[in-house]
Amino acid sequence: MQYEGVLQKMQTEMGTPIQYYLVFENDFLNMNQVLDKKLELTFIKHQCLNCGLDKPIYRQGFCKSCFFEIPSAGDWIMRPELSTAHLDKEDRDLDYEKKVQLQPHIVYLANSSNVKVGVTRKSQVPTRWIDQGAHEAIEIVEVPNRYLAGITEVALKEHVSDKTNWRKMLTNNLEDVNLEDWKEKLKPFVPNEAVDYFLENNTETHLEFPVQRYPEKIKSLNLEKAISYTGVLKGIKGQYLIFEDNTVFNIRGNEGLYVGLEIK
Ligand SMILES: [Zn+2]
């Protein structure tokens, strides 16, 4: 079976285990069903997720000029505390920014390689946690806009990491920690503006990824350089495909690559 199209982060569905879908323009593939099968990935060209042109991908699947122009790549995406739509203040496109920023947001703790704090739109729970490869997570506050979530995250990251170690995330020696305890410990550091939104009595969510075999010594695939790679798929975690020979491929990190995928 042969597929072809531009890579975008895999769609997911909560389940035991989580289900992953690679979605192309006219086709989609449930990746869980090709576990244990041999896949051949081939780099064909670039295709910017905004303009569609064959230009080098700069970040987040966009070419450089799109990345610096389009509203969905503003600085407030990666740094929510810079959000200004609640002040009626435009960054690149106020209508778009109002739509995205002025909706319920969650500040959460997730454990993928270590406990970390993060921000997401409420509609992206648990998708965000799945994409990060977290095996457990819990909401801390639910606030009405992105700015409040951002300043809460900034305050909390004085006391807990805001980074994931993806290499460790892809190994099997992960700790289960009590995130409810962590949440209570962090409560005093939630800023005044957000303290009324602290969530009481919620519990941890546990996530189970479809991984048959974890890699031992991780090799990261650079498909643009290699042009072609063939391997047996042994697992999926976060947005990573894990192959039998310890090669891993980050689908999200390769958004905007137009590839061929053959199931052998
Ligand atoms: Zn572009």
Image (cartoon, rainbow, N blue to C red):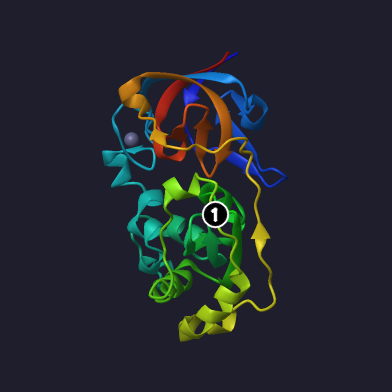
Residue at disc 1, secondary structure = loop
Quadrant position of the N terminus in the picture: top right
Q: Nearer the viewer, residue 142 or 89?
A: 142
Q: Across the whole image, how many numbered discs are drawn on residues?
A: 1
Write down the residue under mark 1. Answer: 174
Q: Position of residue 82 (x, y in %)?
A: 35, 67
Residue 259, placed above or below residue 174: above
Q: Position of residue 117 (x, y in %)?
A: 48, 66
Mark 1: few/some/many CA within 10 Å (<14, 14-19, 20+): some
Residue at point 54%, 61% (across, down): 110
Quadrant position of the C terminus in the picture: top right
Q: Nearer the viewer, residue 221 or 24?
A: 221
Residue at point 48%, 60% (across, down): 114
Residue 216, placed above or below residue 157: above
Q: Position of residue 152 (x, y in %)?
A: 45, 74
Residue at point 50%, 85% (across, down): 188
Residue 80, placed above or below residue 143: above
Residue 44, placed above or below residue 23: above
Residue 56 is left or right of residue 22, and the answer is left
Residue 51 in sight in this render: yes
Residue at point 54%, 59% (across, down): 111
Which quadrant of the figure shows ligand 1?
A: top left
Look at label 1 and name its amino acid: Leu
